[in-house]
Amino acid sequence: MSGGPARLRVAFVLGLATGGTARHVAALAAACRAAGLAVSVIAPAPTLAMLNANAGIETFSLGIGGRPQPADLAAVVRLRHRLGSWRPDVVHAHGVRAGAVAGLAIGGTGPGRRRPALVVTVHNAPPAGRRGRLVYGVLERICARRADLVLCASADLTARMRDLGAAEVQQFDVPAPAATPPSPDEVAKARADIGAGDRPVVLAVARLAPQKGLDVLIEAAGRWRRRDPQPCTVIAGDGPLAAALRAQASRVRADVLLLGSRQDVPALLELADVVVVPSRWEARALILQEAMRSGKPIVATSVGGTPELVGSASASRDNRASRDTGANRDNTASQDTGAVLIPADDPAALAAAVISVLDDPGLAARLRLAARARSAAFPTENDAVKAAMSMYARLTASR
């Protein structure tokens, strides 16, 4: 291929996406367009609306749903036609469903130089449930066999895709965007919305979905309801489990406030005494990065990429061992770790960890210092964009 990176044509393909994945793709697409690349975003209409594409970025609506379905064959055919007419140099798919659809579509776009390079970013681990894992495994194998480069959001995903035989696999950190400090008015409004008064605030920010483990947080909140003063547990986010979580909070008589979707997360962080990330799996959670940059004490589950993110690689190894043996572990916290790490699905451990942070000012102070120090070395969105564009240029030059 002749010409420099500014002449590259990059098509981003993704399915139904919210939160970190959508924000990451939006940032990549906008930065690539600003650098002079031709950019197209191909996704379902709800995702395109969420991405809010800038001027100069072409969009194409493609129905890649949340679950495999017969219509996926039509999506492969439509994407094949789109790629054949738009002729990108690189197709960057996000998620294994989008990656599998793109891999199958690219197989019919023509031989030789007309075939674009395929990059697939794997953002998530397989879902719970035997059937879901089997289907996900098939999609992973398609991605591994058809992608020129597989990028993974955490070390465990990198190992998984390498074991599946991907030609080239790299870990690619998905950074949280830089946050503007909240204004006093924003903090005051958030304080009024929460209505906690002088009570400590335990904050979680997550999609209300099974992966996020918010049911475990509510169970833990029921255990600390007799503490004086009782912590106010605040959950910001929306999702399919909203009604079930409200019913659970009522059943266990926990003081839990579900705020719904919020655009003022920095203001909520300002008010938090402890930030809790009770997920059953995470790669590189944006809220963890944001909380660490804010210098907040954190309690999180030792799953996926979280131990590496907060600075506890040994905890990550221990966590893999505990998953294999079913053994419990003690809470993990050290002076160079930006969080107290606990096992997933353990409300007793979660409750004990939160209370220990609230009752021990020295521990809370150490966590704040460690979180700020570690987050200072986090990659920025600009770092991620530069790395991605370098990969695009390398892949097209090698073809």
Image (cartoon, rainbow, N blue to C red):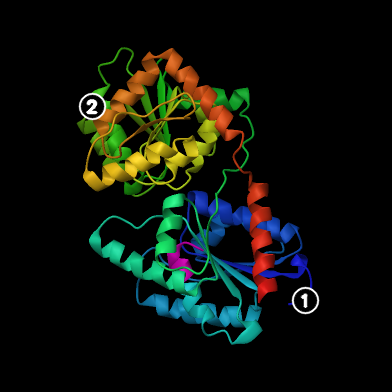
Q: Residue at the spot x=49%, y=18% of the render?
A: 365
Q: Which residue is mark 2?
A: 253
Look at the image and tell me whether residue 112 can be seen: yes
Magenta span contains residue 229: no
Measure the alpha-carbon separation of dots 2 and 1. Answer: 66 Å
Q: Identify which amino acid the numbered label 1 is placed on.
A: Ser
In the image, taking residue 5 as reference, residue 186 lies left or right, namely: left
Return the residue at label 1.
2
Q: Nearer the viewer, mark 2 or mark 1?
A: 1
Q: Which residues are magenta?
A: 94-100
**What amino acid is labelled 2 in the image?**
Arg
Percent position of residue 195, x then y: 43, 21
The one of 383 and 83 positioned closer to us in this rendering: 383
Secondary structure at badge 2 equals: loop
Residue 121 x/y as whole percent: 51, 60
Quadrant where the image shows the C terminus: bottom right
Residue toward you, 265 or 350: 350
The image shows residue 45 at horizontal and vertical percentages of 51, 64
Side of 227 relative to 399 (left or right)? left
Circle nearer the N terminus (2, 1) = 1
- Among the 4 quarters of the image, the one containing residue 242: top left
Judge whether 73 appears above or below 199 on screen.
below
Q: Is residue 96 magenta?
A: yes
Mark 1: secondary structure = loop
Residue at position x 59%, y 40% from top? 378
Count of numbered circles in the view: 2
- Dot 2: within a 10 Å radius of its alpha carbon, few (fewer than 14), some, or many (20 or more) residues? some
**Is there CB contact under 8 Å for labels 2 and 1?**
no
